[in-house]
Image (cartoon, grey):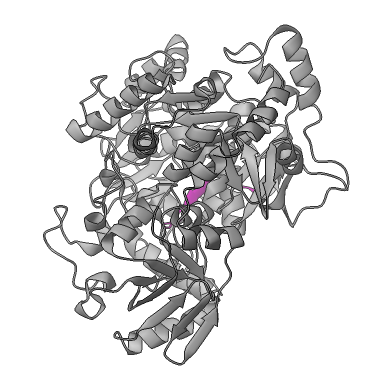
Amino acid sequence: MAKTLYDKVWEAHVVDQLGEDSLLYIDRHLIHEVTSPQAFAGLNEKGRKVRRPDRTFGTMDHSISTRSLAIDACGPQNALQLKTLATNCEEHGVKLFPVGHQKQGIVHVMGPELGLILPGMTVVCGDSHTATHGAFGALAFGIGTSQVEHVLATQTLKQSKAKSMLINVNGKLAVGITAKDIILAIIGKIGHAGATGHVIEYAGEAIRSLTMEERMTICNMSIEAGAKAGMVAPDDTTFEYVKGREYAPTGSDWDEAVAYWKSLHSEDGATFDTVVELDAADIAPQITWGTNPGQVIGVDAPVPAPEDFSDAVEKESARKALAYMGLSAGDKLDAVPVSHVFIGSCTNGRIEDMRAAAFIAKQGKVADTVTAIVVPGSGAVKRQAEEEGLDKIFTDAGFEWRLPGCSMCLGMNDDILQSGDRCASTSNRNFEGRQGRGARTHLVSPAMAAAAALKGRFADVREFQE
Amino acid sequence: MSQGFTVHTGRACPLDQANVDTDQIIPKQFLTGVTRTGYGKHLFHDWRYLDLHEQEPNPDFVVNKPEYAGASILLSRENFGCGSSREHAPWALADFGFDVVIATSFADIFYGNCINNQLLPIALSSSQMDALFGAVKANADLEIVVDLPAQTVVAGDLTFSFDILAHHKNNLIKGLDAIGQTLELTSTIEEFEAKQPAWL
């Protein structure tokens, strides 16, 4: 039977079949300070060791300040968590990129940029946005802390195979439309739980033409559609990105690896449990209006009414979301003022995102009513942006230029919004209270966020493209 | 986990909404701990308290209503536990006193995290949930019996059976140490590793 990309990567990692479950080998394990302390504590209690410290890499990202390199900048509780990670990594021989290290960054930004993620790998991390790494044709998914402990101890996980979903984005994107708009449009189409129980493969002309960073943005938000993972078959774009990175294979190993990676694609005739088709040309700049990522519209569309939804659950969710967001049916979002702009995160904190935002930023000044921050996803992104003079463009326009970290995406640090604040955010979740209790989050692309900063309200980024 | 899950009898709290995400179950400011305990007091913080310091309970939030005090079964709707992979969510639910969550559907990572924490997630159909919500809202004292070996939920006149994977059920009932089980397969894991290419 013709196999899918997911079938191939799955089958290559089955260590043992345990009834309906497979014991799956994990090639790469990324860890950070928030979801690992209890896992290490569990190991220590039982006197267990990390089976493959050489396959495990740590970074500090969630609990750190992006204003200061001081480990206690966000208070003693955060500092304890960060120090606990450092101690655990040291005791168990795990390589760690701590705050201030030149390779430190958001786990899903620094991993790929170091070449730690290769096509065909299995990758896990105690973080739902691990799906990011599927951009390489890896099977990458987020896990809980008990599973982190299981992987640390055994380098394996018990898993049941998910269903498969093929999402084809056909044709070419219109000018000014980004990967963020594609993934938001997909989630809008299939819904916030539309891919629950599935591994998605993204395909079609529009996906194929994306850069690796853009593919990472797409796969990153697979979890926002409920998916276990999202994957893109590796191709020359992938190989070119990986080649020469610190942990990538070299010499004859490289040739052997590429030969294998070229086999990692869904075969003709492979069947999927679900197939979704989108026409790229139909996608407008996207903006969420509600409190889950599926509540999204094109910037030129009116905010929907609860009555527009036939499903009773969606109707009720829309009613609640409008109340929380302080919006009414029929509102045009480009008339809605914003108080904050956040550009960064594992979704949109890479160099191409910085460039896209800077392209808009250089066309004006941040409105007096707006606080705008730009947070590079890693030390490497920060250095590259500064080499290109992007930091100067941002600060000249009135944006703050920060240190790398997760920052305001989840506000586990000193970047947190107040009740009633309204934020144009390039992050991935617009849940109630995500960026601060009572704060209102609208998910957009980096260019849309920068445009909102300049206008003091949402704006159609296509006005800036000439 | 040492003690196993078999039959649970308790009253239910009806949290009648869809897409309850893990940021709501336990907000980020409470994720800075380094232990698995103590999260229950912060469960549903934004909804449960009117203030940031957890001094003023919100009387309108269902979990705070006196008639549902001491409930050990949480009812909810579609896509419960969506969003972040934080295992602090099931830790908070269990620490607060919930042993079972019955909902129309669950997000995948949250579901797995529950299984690993002896918190039983049960998915019932939309119409079955309607009936269960109706019964609990009509009578907050209704005793519900959740029988894992028999895979049934009995609430007064209502009896529903539910699906659960055999190995999830087995692990919950026996309270097995999953890592210990896998470590018994170490030689098989070593054989697998020996076959992997050197460049990995």
Query: A12 or A206, which is in the foreground?
Result: A12
Residue A155 seen in this snapshot: yes
Residue placed at 54% from the left, 34% from the top? A154
Query: A293 or A24, which is in the foreground?
Result: A24
Residue A401 seen in this snapshot: no
Location of residue A38 by image quarter = top left
Q: Residue furthest top?
A: A251
Seen in the picture, residue A77 relative to A291 is either above or below; the reply is above
Seen in the picture, residue A144 relative to B69 is either above or below; the reply is above
Q: Residue furthest bottom?
A: B157
Residue placed at 33% from the left, 60% from the top? B93
Q: Position of residue A214 (x, y in %)?
A: 60, 32
Q: Position of residue A387 (x, y in %)?
A: 45, 9
Residue placed at 46% from the left, 29% from the top? A107
Location of residue A63 by image quarter = top left
Q: Position of residue A150 (x, y in %)?
A: 49, 39
Seen in the picture, residue A358 relative to A422 is either above or below; the reply is above
Asked whether residue A423 is drawn in magenta, I would say no
Q: Which residues are magenta?
A: A283-292
Q: Is residue A368 left or right of residue A39?
A: left
Residue placed at 71% from the left, 51% from the top? A164
Q: Is residue A114 left or right of residue B26?
A: right
Labels in figure, total:
0
Image quarter (top left, top right, bottom left or bottom right) of the C terminus of chain B = top right
Q: Is residue A404 left or right of residue A231?
A: left
Give the overall secondary structure of the magenta segment.
Answer: loop
Seen in the picture, residue A58 relative to A273 is either above or below; the reply is above
Asked whether residue A289 is drawn in magenta, I would say yes
Q: Position of residue A315 (x, y in %)?
A: 48, 72
Query: A150 or A329, which is in the foreground?
Result: A150
Q: Residue furthest left?
A: B55
